[in-house]
């Protein structure tokens, strides 16, 4: 399963300056030829929203300036562009740290219900990730985080879940 770069090798053909790629997942046809100022070597594709979840067969052809084409080179890639479930029931409580007698935000939320390939939760304060939590949590021990870096003022917190591929959910509500 991939979401990052997938390399298609262009070998045994020197002087290639144009390339076309197709994805056979849904019977797609080759795209238009793209011309490069340098010789085409290997090609890195990213599984992204442009490609379908599931098995994709990427096929590449290259040609030189005289119009000589390679035989197609193919590579099967399983793309995963689906984010994990959104964490729910985020609660922010102010708790007093007995060691410092300061009040700090303490966050607790309901664990995601379909852990699949869960990797972590991102904790965000005012839209910026400040920490990660790798314990998925359970019904009896929900995931939580104490924001010891908060000094004073007002803050807005959200939590997102991230899978092992790097897909991130929408923020908690």
Image (cartoon, rainbow, N blue to C red):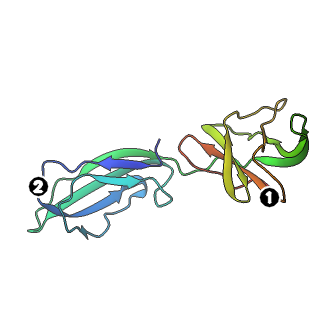
At horizontal 16% and vertical 56% (from top left) the residue drawn is 70
Residue 39: image tag: none
Secondary element under disc 1, as helix, strand or loop, is loop
At horizontal 68% and vertical 49% (from top left) the residue drawn is 130
Q: Are marks 2 and 1 in contact (CB under 8 Å)?
A: no
Quadrant location of the C terminus? bottom right
Measured along the vertical axis of the image, is residue 110 above or below residue 170?
above
- Out of 158 and 57, give the one closest to the viewer: 158
Mark 2 packing: few (<14 Cα in 10 Å), some, or many (20+)? some
Measured along the vertical axis of the image, is residue 40 above or below residue 34?
above
Location of mark 2 (residue): 14
Location of mark 1 (residue): 156
Which residue ends up furthest to the left in the rendered image? Answer: 66
- Position of residue 35 measured from the top left corner of the image (x, y, whole percent): 23, 69
Which residue ends up furthest to the top in the rendered image? Answer: 140
Q: Nearer the N terminus, badge 2 or badge 1?
A: 2
In screen coordinates, is 49 left or right of 7?
right
Q: In which quarter of the image is residue 141?
A: top right
- Position of residue 154 measured from the top left corner of the image (x, y, whole percent): 84, 60
At horizontal 86% and vertical 38% (from top left) the residue drawn is 100
In screen coordinates, is 135 left or right of 55?
right
- Out of 92 and 105, give the one closest to the viewer: 105
- Out of 164 and 58, give the one closest to the viewer: 164
- Position of residue 166 measured from the top left corner of the image (x, y, whole percent): 55, 46
In screen coordinates, is 105 left or right of 158?
right
Q: In which quarter of the image is residue 107?
A: top right
Q: CA gap, disc 2 to disc 1?
A: 56 Å
The mark lying in front, picked from 2 and 1, is 1
Number of numbered markers: 2
């Amino acid at each position: 399963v991939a979401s990052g770069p997938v390399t298609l090798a262009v070998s045994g053909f020197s002087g290639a300056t144009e390339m076309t790629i197709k994805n056979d997942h849904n019977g797609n046809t080759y795209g238009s030829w793209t011309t490069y100022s340098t010789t085409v070597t290997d090609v890195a594709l990213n599984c992204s929203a442009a490609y379908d979840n599931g098995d994709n067969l990427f096929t590449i052809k290259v040609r030189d300036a005289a119009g000589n084409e390679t035989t197609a080179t193919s590579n099967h890639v399983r793309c995963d562009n689906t984010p994990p479930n959104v964490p729910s029931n985020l609660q922010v409580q102010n708790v007093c740290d007995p060691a410092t007698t300061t009040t700090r935000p303490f966050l607790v939320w309901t664990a995601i219900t379909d852990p699949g390939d869960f990797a972590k939760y991102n904790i965000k304060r005012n839209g910026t990730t400040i920490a990660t939590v790798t314990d998925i949590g359970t019904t009896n021990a929900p995931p939580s985080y104490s924001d010891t870096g908060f000094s004073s003022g007002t803050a807005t917190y959200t939590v997102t879940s991230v899978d092992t591929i790097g897909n991130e959910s929408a923020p908690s509500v």
